[in-house]
Amino acid sequence: MEKIPLIIDCDPGVDDAYAIILANHIQRLDVLAVTTVSGNVDIELTTKNALMLTDFLGMTCVVAKGEERPLVKENKMAYSTHGSDGIGGATSLFPPQSAKKLDQDRALKVLKDTLMNAPQKVAIAAIGPLTNIALLLKVYPEVKEKIKVISIMGGAINHGNVTPCSEFNFHVDPEAASIVLNSGVPIILSGIHLTIKATLTESDIKIIQNSGTKLSKIVVQMIGAYTSKDTAFHDPCAILALSHPELFKGEDLHVQVDTREGITRGMSYAEYRRKHQKKSNCHVLNEIDLEAFRKMMVGCFS
């Protein structure tokens, strides 16, 4: 089985942490690097969480610290959803010291080097604000030919969770989202119009709990706090869109992002008007096989 080389750009974050666990579990994926960005919590915490989790999982990938603020505006974070440590209070369940070391280079260089040195095209799962990825595409445009696809968790079609119009990741850095969507690189978009359906049942959580491993204990702690604020596991969708595309249905659309101030800042919208139809710039996922999704999420602990 040929593996898919993968970079995960993330802001852990409970659902980011679950996405990393899932990617590590799926044999079809070969995680080359995990890069961090400020988003759900600040850059120090997202980086600490990524390092701590990849070390705990025994992952050999590079971990690199990314951008600490969006391209234009100040940070907006989601501590109320993800907890003061970003992972639902689960920090105390990890070993006090991580043996894994942060790469000496920052995320921008690690992203570029990982792509350019790879023998084949690499997929990117971008599951936080798109600041790192936008900078990568602008500063090193030569990497575009080395990217197989960018699987984004972000945006929405006619939906929002930060405002009635805007999803969190795109709202935090809409300028970055606009750059990435207009980059010409193949894109899969898992917006919250899709990911809001990606839930676990109490029975699923009980199965995870009953597996009795150290990892399951950590995950149950994380999601216990998280699901009281947000019942959906958004970020794993962007991982499964790469490894198990048969779980989803979607359509090719031309999607743009509103960068203006106000309630629509970060809004992503698709062009449906026939006479104004433009060439599609991303594949927008609309439907998910929920039963199969839940089996994959629970299967990490079997």
Image: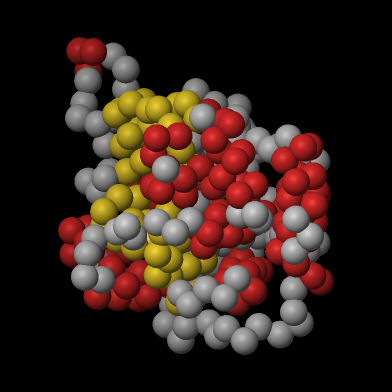
In this rendering, does residue 4 appear at all?
yes
Q: Pinpoint residue 131: horizontal percent, then vertical percent.
A: 44, 58
Vertical placement of residue 68 versus 174, above or below: below
Vertical placement of residue 73 versus 181, above or below: below
Q: Which residue is at a point 42% across and 82% down the rendered structure image?
A: 105
Q: Which residue is at a point 46% across and 45% down the rendered structure image?
A: 240
Vertical placement of residue 100 versus 71, above or below: below
- Describe the colour scheme in one phrase: secondary structure
Q: As drawn, is 55 to the left or to the right of 131?
A: right
Q: As drawn, is 170 to the left or to the right of 90?
A: left
Splitting the image into 4 quarters, where does residue 143 fall? bottom left
Q: Pinpoint residue 71: horizontal percent, then vertical percent.
A: 44, 58
Q: What quarter of the picture does the N terminus occupy? A: bottom left
Q: Pinpoint residue 135: horizontal percent, then vertical percent.
A: 35, 62
Return the residue nearer the eye: 251 or 142.
Answer: 251
Return the residue nearer the eye: 253 or 21.
Answer: 21
Q: Pinpoint residue 75: horizontal percent, then vertical percent.
A: 59, 57
Q: What quarter of the picture does the C terminus occupy? A: bottom right
